[in-house]
Image: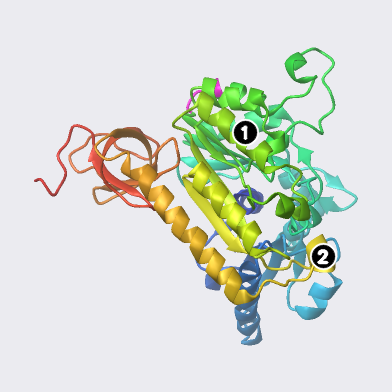
Amino acid sequence: MSTFHIWTLGCQMNQADSLKLAAGLEGLGYHAVDDDVDADLVVINTCSVRQHAEDRAYSRMGVLRKRRNEGKRFKIAVMGCMVGPKTDDLRKRFPYVDVWARPQEFDGILQVAGDLRDVSGGELGALMGDLDGGAIKMAPGTYGLPKGPTAYVPVIHGCDKFCTYCIVPLRRGREDSRPAADILDEVRFLAAHGVREVTLLGQTVEAYGHDLEPDTTGLYAETGGRPDLATLFEGIDAIEGISRVRFLTSYPKDMTDRIIDAVADQPKVCEHFNIPVQSGSESMLLRMRRGYTVADFEDRVARIRSRMPDAAIVTDVIVGCPGETEAEFADTIALLERTQFDIIHVAAYSPRPGTYAARNLPDDVPAEVKKERLHIVEALHAASSERINQRLLGREVEVLVEQNENGRATGRTRQGQLVHFDVIGAQGRTLGDLVRVEISQATPWSLQGHVAGMLTLSVL
């Protein structure tokens, strides 16, 4: 039996890509293995948003080269955001890699997999879909199935924003929305296979539908003839078996009142927003080419909190971008303190080759200053998160069970907080169940408790 192993770095979109590729390989008769030492085909799904992620990919590729030099026989595929439209430089640097594949472009990997198993083009076409000029296309309806009750569902690929620091549009291309019917079919497939929570994915998820051709039947009259993210919420709310819907990542200018209202009104959609602000400085946002002002961002936060006072709001911040002054960083801190985010993801700026910033803006903030600012934001995040989580002490929250081992379960609240809780003696606490949990301990990073109405182990 032919085997494969996929090692995935980076965002949830990469995880979804890996699951889809795995489904395609399984369609060719391959079997997934947990260790790449045992694999006939090793796939590295890369991320290039941060230098650290690229360094990890290079390190893993070096390990595979050494194994190949020792006489091991296996194929190597590298896919994802490290792979641009031109691969000449990569092929020269890493000649031992058998195939390079851009995000969502699985053809070359499937061809190598077919060659490994000596599968003919006709057989590949029967297994995977149409053959277009010799290129294998993933068959429509080939959906990856996660191991567990939660799943990621990409709804729009690519990005049209072209922020100065970001490599994503150069690697994943322009915005490309999937048909609403295909998305809903995938969610039905997942629900039929035990998935209870889906997260709708897009680099800017509220942009979903902008690029689709208008429907002339009047089906989407409320949104100018095109489906939008709220349309998907409404459709998924009617799918039996799905308990929760999440979505990320948001972009302030695309977040309409209609979408915010749909989160508030649709019972299955979680009150959990991930809206990157990146900076609280007007001048820095302009240099970043983010396309909105601080006032625009705060308006969206105010709208969310007016409709859903208990909604969780998560943000991303980059410190040390080219030219960031002490005053600009102070503006960011002031915004974070005003807003009191549930979670703040923070990263220090690193130039990404090919971006506008790498070509035109000097990386002039010293490394030690970036590190200091990073720690300041991390401390602010810890304090803000702990304050928010402390409010839940003694209260009951709804948790979807994602793991359950040896009487200890783990899951998340509707607002996204991680919860660990005791389930010994509780009946029917299987993966995907919704459980009422009483919170007894709170830290910035997680909550702990026990099934409501039952004593904790410490009391016993």
Q: Which residues are magenta?
A: 237-241
Specify whether residue 218 is in view. yes
Q: In x, y percent, where is residue 272?
A: 51, 37
Out of 203 and 147, give the one closest to the viewer.
203
Image coloring type: rainbow
Is residue 285 shown left or right of residue 331? Answer: right
Disc 1 residue type (three-letter): Arg
Amino acid tagged 2:
Gly
Q: Look at 31% across and 38% down and name the residue there.
A: 392
Name the residue beneath numbered marker 2.
354
Secondary structure at badge 2 equals loop
Q: What is the quadrant of the N terminus in the image? A: bottom right
> Which badge, 1 or 2, is on the more N-terminal residue?
1
- Residue 321 point in image, percent of width and height: 69, 63
Q: Please tell me which residue lies in front, 192 or 392.
A: 392
Q: Quadrant for residue 109, please give it.
A: bottom right
Main SS type for the magenta part? loop
Which of the numbered marks, if any, corresponds to residue 300?
A: 1
Residue at left offset 29%, top offset 37% = 429
The stretch drawn in magenta includes residue 117? no
Residue 310: name its quadrant.
top left
Q: Residue at x 68, y 35 (%)?
A: 206
How far apart, in angstroms, are the residues tagged by discs 1 and 2? 32 Å
- Left/right placement of residue 423 relative to residue 443 reads left
Extreme residue in the bottom direction: 70
